[in-house]
Image (cartoon, grey):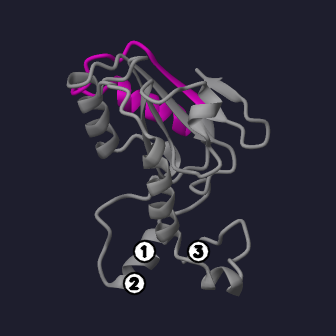
């Protein structure tokens, strides 16, 4: 594949440690000991859905001042608005009452400059063409605008008057609004 990680490969010592998912399960057991059902509804308190990149450097709850139960957070590679994103937003609005949508891309995104060669190489490797598009981009601001347009023109969404797009700077933590 044409993608290389930004950080070094884990050391051999990490290979002998418990598998990461086993650590998740153990952490969950610890969490469940003090967990108390707060009686929250599935409808977000702030009536907002956030679409953002899956990049592990984005701590959306901290960056946006969100608490558990405040927002629906929909994440995918690039934070692009795909058919599945529209599906999630439609359910979020029509079944669960959200009214506002924030779209968040970020600097240093792995989709910046990735090409359809990624898809072709994948097809050669596994012998099957992916049904999905890579949705890569070279213009960060332009892709935020395209994502906003996809949301605003979707016939499935009821509320498209409060759709705003941003670029999160992974070095400063600041959002820059795209108009």
- Residue under numbered circle 2: 124
106 up-or-down from 179: above or below: below
- Residue under numbered circle 1: 120
The alpha-carbon separation of the residues under discs 2 and 3 comes to 13 Å
What SS does tag 3 mark? loop
Quadrant position of residue 70:
top left
> In the rendering, which numbered label is found on residue 98?
none
What SS does tag 2 mark? helix
Say left or right for 169 vs 35.
right
Local crowd size for mark 3, using a 10 Å CA cut-off: few (<14), some (14–19), many (≥20): few
Q: Residue at x 69, y 50 (%)?
A: 108
Upstream in sequence: badge 2 or badge 3: 3
Upstream in sequence: badge 3 or badge 1: 3
Q: Quadrant of the C terminus?
A: top right
Q: Say which of 179 and 92 sits in front.
A: 92
What SS does tag 1 mark? helix
Q: Say which of 169 and 129 sits in front.
A: 169
Residue range (magenta) = 142-166
Q: Residue furthest top?
A: 161
Q: Residue furthest right?
A: 172
Q: Say if the magenta span includes residue 145.
A: yes
The alpha-carbon separation of the residues under discs 3 and 1 comes to 11 Å
Say left or right for 124 vs 128.
right
- Residue under numbered circle 3: 2
Quadrant position of residue 153:
top left
133 up-or-down from 107: above or below: below
Residue 50: give x, y in percent of width and height.
46, 31
Please report contact status of discs 2 and 1: CB closer than 8 Å, yes or no.
yes
């Amino acid at each position: 594949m044409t993608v290389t990680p930004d950080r070094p490969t884990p050391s051999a010592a990490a290979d002998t440690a418990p598998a990461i998912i086993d650590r998740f399960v153990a952490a969950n057991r610890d969490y469940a000991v003090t967990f108390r059902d707060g009686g929250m509804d599935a409808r977000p308190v702030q009536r907002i859905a956030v679409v953002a990149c899956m990049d592990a450097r984005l701590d959306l709850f901290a960056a946006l001042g969100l608490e558990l139960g405040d927002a629906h957070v929909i994440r995918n590679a690039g934070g692009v608005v795909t058919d599945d994103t529209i599906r999630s937003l439609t359910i979020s609005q029509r079944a669960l009452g959200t009214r506002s949508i924030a779209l968040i891309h970020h600097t240093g995104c792995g989709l910046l400059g990735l090409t359809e060669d990624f898809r072709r190489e994948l097809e050669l490797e596994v012998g099957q063409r992916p049904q999905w598009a890579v949705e890569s981009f070279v213009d960060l601001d332009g892709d935020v605008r395209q994502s906003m347009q996809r949301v605003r023109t979707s016939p499935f969404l009821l509320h498209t008057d409060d759709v705003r797009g941003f670029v999160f700077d992974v070095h400063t933590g600041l959002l820059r609004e795209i108009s």
